[in-house]
Image: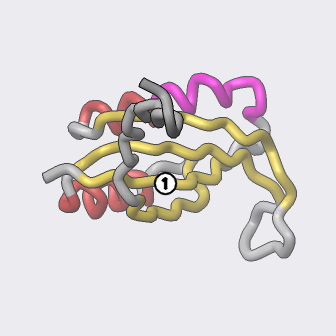
Amino acid sequence: MKNRYEVLIVLNTQGKEDTVKEIVDRLEGEFQKEGAEIEQVQKMDKRQFSYVSGQLDAGFFVNFVFHADPQLITKLRSKFKLDPEVYRQHYQRLREKKVKKERTPKKLAGAK
């Protein structure tokens, strides 16, 4: 059974700011190659970190929402950990989207 997940990836684009689109497209292809169904990709621009925890002080944030099997998360996490352009990654399981029901108009009191 496929679950709905969200992953926030911080990219190390130091010196490669003009190739961000290619990096995001490559990561999206990696998700699809592993069997994930991409629902949404949100590019959130480059942001400064509130504190420096490594060699970088800023990174390009990208948010992916996708459907995948639970075992795939471990595989993706391991794969992206080896990618030099992925600085940080955070996965979170989301609730399934609720399908809104069509509302039927209420009949007015006294209407025939």
Question: Where is residue 24 drawn, in percent x and y?
Answer: 55, 32
- Residue farthest to the left? 1
Q: What residue type is labelled 1?
A: Val
What residue do we see at 19% from left, 60% from top? 71
Q: Is the magenta stretch mostly helix, strand or loop?
A: helix
Pick the front one: 99 or 17: 99
Quadrant where the image shows the C terminus: top left
Question: Where is residue 111 drawn, in percent x and y?
Answer: 48, 28
Q: How many marks?
A: 1
Q: Is mark 1 on a helix, strand or loop?
A: strand
What residue do we see at 41% from left, 40% from top? 100
Indicate whether 99 appears above or below 89: above
Q: Mark 1 points at which residue?
A: 7
Pick the front one: 99 or 76: 99
- Along the horizontal axis of the image, is 55 left or right of 43? right
Where is residue 72, by image quadrant?
Answer: bottom left
- Along the horizontal axis of the image, is 34 left or right of 102? left
In the rendered view, how is the structure colored?
secondary structure
Question: Where is residue 41 drawn, in percent x and y?
Answer: 54, 34
What residue do we see at 47% from left, 36% from top? 106
Pick the front one: 73 or 78: 73
- Along the horizontal axis of the image, is 38 left or right of 53? left
What residue do we see at 30% from left, 44% from top? 67
Where is residue 53, by image quadrant?
Answer: bottom right
User: Label 1 neighbourhood size at 10 Å, few (<14), some (14-19), many (20+)?
Assistant: some
Magenta stretch contains residue 92: no
Question: Where is residue 9 drawn, in percent x and y?
Answer: 57, 52
Q: Give the range drawn in magenta.
A: 16-26
